[in-house]
Image: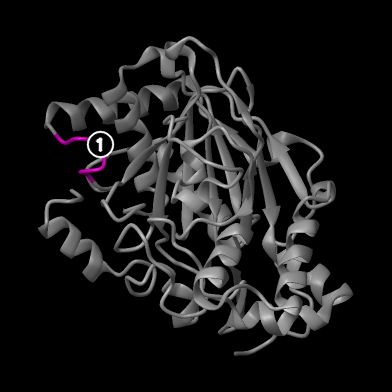
Amino acid sequence: MEILKNPILEPCVWNVSNFKDENEWTYTFSKKEIFELEEAAKKIINTNLAPTSFSKSDFILDSLNEVLEKQLDTLQNGKGFVRLRGLDPKKYDQLTIQTIYWGICSYLGMGIPQNSMGEMMSGVKDYGDKNVGDNPYRQGIRLHRTTAKIDAHTDSCDHVALLCVKRAKEGGESGVVSSLAIYNEILKNKPEYLEVLCKGFHIDLIGKGKTEKELSAHPIPVFSYFEGKMCSRFNKIQIELGAEKKSGGLDSLSQSAIDYVQELTQKNEFHLKMMLEDGDIQVLNNRVCYHTRTAVVDDEDINKKRLLYRVWLNAPEPRPMAPEFANQLNTGERLSLIHISELTRLGMISYA
């Protein structure tokens, strides 16, 4: 375990004051580019390739190829997040919008399963799961299936994409935080927390591993410095639940450390807020960004309820990651291709 003692100086280290205009992190597709996406989707649909069952080589683009390459570079080497705008979900049936979305995602990474059932594209909406108490995680309910507020966290993949099909009646505002800016702040103000944060914690996987109920097989660092690059993985509730199940709870230093990380992510200087409108696609580099969501108030009309589609991606050129950091789901480093192949063999996922 190496602890970096110098501030991180990369484009993915930023605070809100660095962005004066949302156009700095938003790309709007032109009408010509939308047409290009629609034509590529038609060809996929006409060959009976379902969403999540095709790859970049199948989704042929012309001018957009270069555009999406630039977005990928921003994710991997730049600020670490983008918002793509211009799609109108009302124009399309479910098959078409999912095909367009998966096609875009195929240029930003390779899709991987999001849970023990091998789901490749999940609906982020209120599923009506019964929850007792104020913490759905205690019942094994993942928060994206509820209307609850979601605090700063990462998902267990290189890049996470969200397509907003229908925004909420109220709330559901998205937030993005530079996790490496948080590291710099801890280094400056609370360096005594770095050892426990870099050592890491056994986390409750909440159904994201190979089985429905599972802890990480080893401690996963909140911050991991490896081959000259820092990565972060954080979810306060999952860390606390994992500690409860593993050893009865966190020691006082560890609790103070993760409380401080959470406190920093809530500060306005670090927490960039954006509302995803219908048709917006947000893509984040999980290794250098945290994301959040405010509580959702849904419309009573079932046809007007909030709906987003989420995709997890392995990056074409991921940041260097220590093995103990990269294996976050007990499935090998970055959800190994061996595990993906096994899920495919069992018929749990389909990916070409």
Element at badge 1? loop
Q: How is the image coloured?
A: one colour
Count of numbered marks: 1
Q: Residue at x 51, y 51 (%)?
A: 137
In this view, the residue farthest toward the bottom is 1
In this view, the residue farthest toward the top is 301
Towards the viewer: 275 or 92: 275
Classify mark 1: residues with Cα within 10 Å, few (<14), some (14-19) or many (20+).
many
In this view, the residue farthest toward the right is 189
Residue 239 placement: quadrant: bottom right
Query: Does the image show residue 158?
Result: yes
Towards the viewer: 74 or 63: 74
Q: Residue at x 80, y 72 (%)?
A: 186
Q: Is residue 217 left or right of residue 169?
A: left
Is residue 338 within the magenta segment?
no
Can you give x and y, in whole percent of width and height, for residue 252 in the image? 75, 76
Can you give x and y, in whole percent of width and height, for residue 116 in the image? 30, 56
Q: Is residue 124 left or right of residue 170?
A: left
Towards the viewer: 236 or 46: 236
Residue 54 placement: quadrant: top left
Q: Is residue 242 above or below residue 136?
A: below
Q: Which residue is mark 1?
A: 51
Q: Is residue 259 above or below residue 276?
A: below
Which residues are the magenta region?
49-54
Can you give x and y, in whole percent of width and height, for residue 273 in the image? 72, 39
Q: Residue at x 60, y 55 (%)?
A: 153
Residue 121 placement: quadrant: top left
Q: Quadrant of the N terminus?
A: bottom right
Query: Does the image show residue 9?
Result: no
| Magenta span main SS | loop
Q: Residue at x 40, y 51 (%)?
A: 312
